[in-house]
Amino acid sequence: YGSEIMRPTEPADKRKVELSEKDVLAVLRLMRASYNVDTTRVYLLGHSMGGVGAWHLAAKYPERWAGVAAFAGTGNPASVERMKAIPQFVVHGDADATVNVFGSRSMVAAMNRLGMKVTYIEVPEGTHNEVVVPNLAKAFEFLAAQHRQ
């Protein structure tokens, strides 16, 4: 919920925006404190609202992430400039009735205009949920090959 795309107006919804971002960053802090984390290999991966959040956090904190994998998400193409150094793996089905494929297409088009490293898989007849599992291994392979300089 931590994205400007959600445009919350109600106080409770604004609080969700604030808390969802804090939650992700708190988990990252806990992982770094509890495990030997290679800070050059921290990734964002999300589906649907998680994809929206992944793009939001990548643009807001670009220095933290080595790569992003967004499944069936959407974002603000104007934010792509802030994450131009972050390799991207994007998957969306062209029959997604929950989040229109135009969201990923717009983000990928903006990434391509900037010459970013982006892999885009558009699944013909793919619906919102069925595009994830068949492409997870490819996403993990892509992310594993990335590291922040």
Image (cartoon, grey):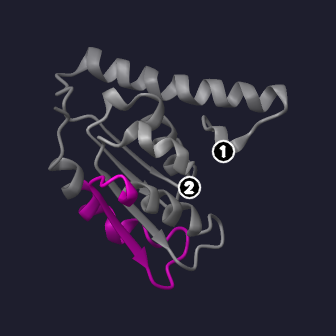
- Tag 2 secondary structure: loop
What is the quadrant of residue 86 in the picture?
top left
The magenta-colored residue range is 112-140
Q: Nearer the viewer, residue 88 or 26?
A: 88
Residue nearest the observer in this picture, 86 or 95: 86
Relative vertical location of residue 97 with respect to residue 140 in this rendering, above or below: below
**Label 1 sits on residue:** 5
Q: Kindly identify the amino acid type of the residue bearing the numbered disc 1.
A: Ile
Q: Amino acid at mark 2?
A: Thr
- Examine the image and state in which quarter residue 30 appears: top left
Nearer to me, 144 or 62:
62
Instruction: Determine which of the numbered discs, if any, sits on residue 52 in the image.
Output: none
Q: Is residue 81 above or below residue 70?
A: above
- Mark 1 near mark 2, Cβ–Cβ under 8 Å? yes
Residue at image point 26% right, 54% down = 117
Residue 31 at x, y = what percent?
31, 23
Within 10 angstroms of label 2, few (less than 14), some, or many (20 or more) residues?
many
Q: In the rendered view, does 6 fall on the left or right side of 123?
A: right
Q: Which residue is mark 2?
A: 74
Query: Which image quarter holds the N terminus?
Result: top right
Q: Is residue 2 magenta?
A: no
Q: Report the residue at 44% width, 71% height from top.
A: 131
Q: Residues within 10 Å of mark 1 (few under 14, many from 20)?
A: few
* Residue 149 relative to residue 2: left or right: left
